[in-house]
Image (cartoon, rainbow, N blue to C red):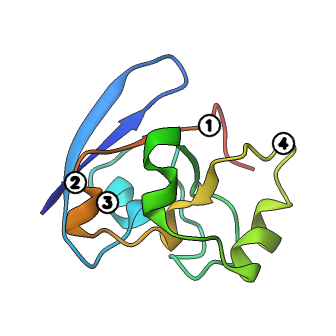
């Protein structure tokens, strides 16, 4: 298990436990984190699970795939550390990961 910290746009923090091998989107959905829709079920076919990874964690989440980059272009603004939650696999190394939730999903 790894601890994931979701931070709302107003600064409210939500700490959840996530299974290694799962992903950030699934951890949010399993724990009823508002702001993560995951409409495509984690298939990297939408951008309704986008998050902004805290800069100190970004390198540990891995590189964006070409498909993920394409989905992120649907957002009105793309933060440098933007990722799709469904594409961030939970590993032991990500224990304590901090991600910031958008005001709204698009």
Q: Which residue is mark 4?
A: 77
Q: Are marks 3 and 2 in contact (CB under 8 Å)?
A: no
Q: Is 15 displayed left or right of 55 in the figure?
A: left
Tell which circle, 3 or 2, labels the residue nearer the N-terminal end.
Answer: 3
Q: Nearer the viewer, mark 3 or mark 4?
A: 4
Considering the numbered disc 3 on the image, is that residue within a helix, a strand or a loop? helix
Q: Mark 1 — residue?
A: 102
- When asked about the image quadrant of residue 26, the answer is bottom left
Q: Give the SS element for disc 4.
A: loop
Labels 4 and 1 touching (C-beta < 8 A): no
Q: Is tag 4's residue or tag 1's residue first in the polypeptide sequence? A: 4
Residue density around tag 2, few if under 14, some if 14–19, many if 20 or more, within 10 Å: some
Please report whichever mark, 3 or 1, sits nearer to the chain's N-terminal start.
3
Can residue 72 be seen by looking at this rendering? yes
**Alpha-carbon span between mark 3 and mark 1:** 16 Å
Dot 3 and dot 1 residues touching (CB under 8 Å): no
Q: Which label sits in the foreground, 3 or 2? A: 2
| Mark 3–mark 4 distance (CA, rounded to whole Å) | 24 Å
Residue identified by numbered label 3 = 27
Counting from the top left corner in percent of width and height, residue 93 is at 25, 62
Which numbered tag is attached to residue 95? 2
The percent position of residue 24, horizontal first and vertical second, equals: 40, 61
Query: Callout 2: helix, strand or loop?
Result: loop
């Amino acid at each position: 298990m790894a601890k994931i910290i979701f931070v709302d746009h107003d600064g409210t923090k939500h700490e959840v436990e996530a299974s290694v091998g799962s992903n950030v989107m699934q951890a949010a959905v399993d724990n009823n984190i508002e702001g993560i829709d995951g409409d495509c079920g984690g298939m990297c076919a939408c951008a309704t699970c986008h998050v902004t990874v805290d800069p100190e964690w970004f390198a540990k989440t891995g590189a964006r795939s070409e498909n993920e980059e394409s989905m992120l272009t649907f957002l009105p603004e793309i933060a440098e550390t933007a990722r799709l939650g469904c594409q961030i696999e939970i590993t032991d190394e990500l224990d304590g990961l901090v991600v910031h939730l958008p005001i709204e999903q698009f």
